[in-house]
Image (spheres, rainbow, N blue to C red):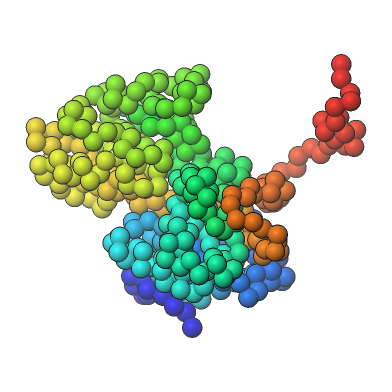
Amino acid sequence: MVNYKVADENLAGKGKEAIYIAESRMPVSAITIRERFAKERPLEGITIAGCLHITKETANLARTLKAGGADVWLCGSNPLSTQDDVAAAMVKEGINTFAWHGNTDEEFYWCIRECLKAKPNILIDDGADMIVTAHKEFPELITDGVIIGCQEETTTGVKRFRAMDAAGDLKVPLFPVNDARCKNQFDNELGTGQGIVAAIYGMHVLFAGKNVVIAGYGHCSSGMALRARGLGANVTVTEIDPIKALQAKFAGFNVMPIETALPYADIILTATGCKHVILPTKENFDALKDGVILGNLGHFDIEIPTKEIYEYAKEIKPIRSDVEEITFPDGKRIYLLAKGRLANLVLSEGHPAEVMDMSFGLQSLMSEYIVKNKDSLKPGMVEVPVEIDDRVGFLKLQAMGIEIDKLNEEQYNYIHGYEQGT
C-alpha cells in the first residue's frame, strides 16, 4: 500500500510525461545505475526517506532507489518547489509521497514527520530539516540504530550540519554530497547559473544593459554571474570572503558592498545561504531603485528580507504566478520573485536533468555505500569517497561518448611519489 498526500491524483498522467522527458536526459542515474540496481537489489529491505524538491528529476532518483529494493518515502524540501503533477505520478509509481505546492510551515513539518514515522534507515536531505527533525523529535531512530546513514545535498544544509557536528550534536554518519565535485561543479554552478532564466520568465526582462547584482561568489553565485554577463548585463558581485571577492574581480566583475550597489541595481539575485543579505532597514529599502527585481536562489526565504519587506509595503499585488509587485510608502515599486524562495525552482522547473543526473547518481551510489559499510560508519561528517565521485564522472563521460587519458604505471608512480626531482 502506498501512503501519500498530494494535491491532485488526476495530474499523474502529466507528471508521467515530465518524468519520462527527464529520464531521457539522465543516463547515469536513471538508466545505467538503475539497470544494475534492478539486477543486484543492493537496497533490499532498506527504507529511505528523502526531504527533497519534488521535481521530475527527483522522481527518477526515487525510481532508481526503488529499483534497488528500497521502500522510498518522499516529502518536499521547500513549500513552493513541489511539482504537483510529478508528486501525483510518483504515487502511481509506488513511491510514498507527501508533498504539494504551497503548503504551510505546519504542513511542511507534518510531511516530514509522516516520512520519519516509517522508521527510515537512510535519510537524504536538502536543507537539513528532515535530519534535524529526526534528532529533535525522533531520537529513538538514532539511539536504536534504525538510521544507519544520511546524506545532505545542498550548501545551506551542509553548513548547518558542520555547525551541528562542531557542537557535538550530530549523532548520525552524514555524507555532505554537496561537497562532491560531481555535485557542486555542475548542479550548483551550471544549474543555479541557468536559474537566472527564472528571472526572465518571471518578468520577461532583457538582461542586456541591466545592472545585475549577484550576492555571493560561491559555486552557485559564480554561475549566475557568468550567465548574467553572457546575457549582456553589467554584473556586480558582493562578497564577505576576501578570496572569493578577488576571484570575482579577476574574473572581470565589479566588486563592492551590497549597500553601495543597491541604488544602481536593476536586478538583485542572491545565493549565499546566509540571512538578510540585504539588511532589513528603512535606509536600504529606500535606496532600492524603482522597478528593481529581487530574486533569491538560495535555500531559504531569508536571504532577501521578505517578511520585513512585506511589513514595510504599502501595497502587495500579485501580477502573475509567483511574482508580486510591492509598492513602498514613497510610491516606489519593486518586484519580488517567488516570495523570496527558490526562484529557479518556483518560477521555472529547477536545474536541468543533465546536471541532476550526476547529483542523483552520487546519491544512489552513496545509498548503496551506506548499506555496504553500515557496520563501520561513525557519527559525524564523513566525506564522499573520491572513487564514487570519480565513478559518476566516468559514467557521465561514457554516456556522452567521451574518452579521456589514463596514467601509465610510470606516470602514476611519478605523481604519487617523491623520490624523483629535477
Q: Residue 368, located in which quarter of the rendered image?
A: bottom right
Q: Is residue 76 left or right of residue 180?
A: left
Q: Nearer the viewer, residue 136 or 392?
A: 136
* Residue 15 visible to an observer of this rendering: no
As drawn, the residue found furthest toward the bottom would be: 1
Q: Quadrant of the C terminus?
A: top right
* x and y, in percent, of residue 301 in the image: 32, 47
* Residue 304 visible to an observer of this rendering: yes
Depicted 349 relative to depicted 226: above or below: below
Q: Residue 375, located in which quarter of the rendered image?
A: bottom right
Q: Is residue 314 left or right of residue 266?
A: left
Depicted 293 relative to depicted 257: above or below: below
Q: Looking at the image, which residue is at 30% across and 64% down?
A: 106
Q: Looking at the image, which residue is at 47% across and 38% down?
A: 220
As drawn, the residue found furthest toward the front would be: 168
* x and y, in percent, of residue 165 in the image: 53, 48
* x and y, in percent, of residue 207 in the image: 34, 31
Q: Is residue 365 left or right of residue 215?
A: right
Q: Looking at the image, which residue is at 65% across and 69% down?
A: 43
Q: Is residue 356 left or right of residue 231?
A: right
Depicted 347 relative to depicted 59: above or below: above
Q: Looking at the image, which residue is at 47% across and 19% down?
A: 249
Depicted 115 relative to depicted 76: above or below: below
How many numbered discs?
0
* x and y, in percent, of residue 65 in the image: 59, 66
Q: Nearer the viewer, residue 143 or 392?
A: 143
